Image (cartoon, rainbow, N blue to C red):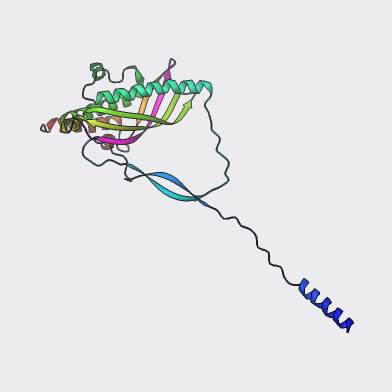
Amino acid sequence: MKLQTIIIVILASSVSSCAPVVQRSFIPSQSPTNILTPTLASASTPATTLGPSPTSTTTATAHPIFETALPPSPTILPNATQAAQQEDIKDVIQAYFEIRYQLLSVSPPADIQQNVFGELVSSGDDARNFLTTETAKLAVERKWYELNKLRYAKYEYSLKYKNFAFDASAQTATVSLYERFDIICERAIQSDSQNPSSCAIGELTHEIILHNENSQWKIIADTYWDSWWRQFRKPGLSASDILRNIELKRQKIDAMPAP
């Protein structure tokens, strides 16, 4: 009887030891993190035409993402020479934009209208087309603003620099930047002098090329796409074609009756 009991215990132990063991791997759950991504309320390119047209505003949309263990991107800093050059270039670009805004204001300085950009723009052949077309475009723009009481009575603008690229062999620099502006025109002042509304709020992207001439940086091109340049610049057009388009626009403006 004792022998049977021992045999039964041994068999029970053997069966128990042969039972499969289920293992579950541990997978940590990822917790979503919300980030805010600025989204333009209007999908179109910010228009810079002054007038009662609606202006684009910026809102924030929350998108869930999962945290990752990516290493931080290294920050590339310019060397001492490039850092000094960047500051010199910023001074030139700042003066260039101030002239542009003054030219379209209610009371521009007299010397600006005679020699628009002065020594800020190169006198070389590589800058001739830019200087000729840009000056003609600004003249037509100013005439339109004057007739429609859209000259700048007050304005605020800021420049946010995106990138500097230097070409040592050609002695050139290409600068990408954002121009943000808020403009109150003379029409708005006349409508409500105490609390005038903005006539134009927006942002433009500029790509400005400069050339180092005798240790002085001078502008040779500025490419941007506001509502005026979208009228005049078309793919494949030469500088002469662009000037012809600007001249046709000027003739139409001159033939318009006064508002």
Residue shown at 25%/16% (left/top)?
111
Magenta residue check for 205: yes
Q: Quadrant of the N terminus?
A: bottom right
- Residue 25 percent coordinates (x, y): 65, 60
Magenta residue check for 13: no
Q: Is residue 20 above or below residue 48?
A: below
Q: Is residue 231 left or right of residue 35?
A: left
Give the number of callouts: 0
- Residue 182 percent coordinates (x, y): 29, 32
Residue shown at 56%/35% (left/top)?
74
Q: Nearer the viewer, residue 81 or 122?
A: 81
For residue 233, which quarter of the picture? top left
> Is residue 171 visible in this depiction of the protein?
no
Range covered by the magenta-colored residues: 192-216
Residue shown at 31%/32% (left/top)?
181
Q: Nearer the viewer, residue 139 or 13?
A: 13
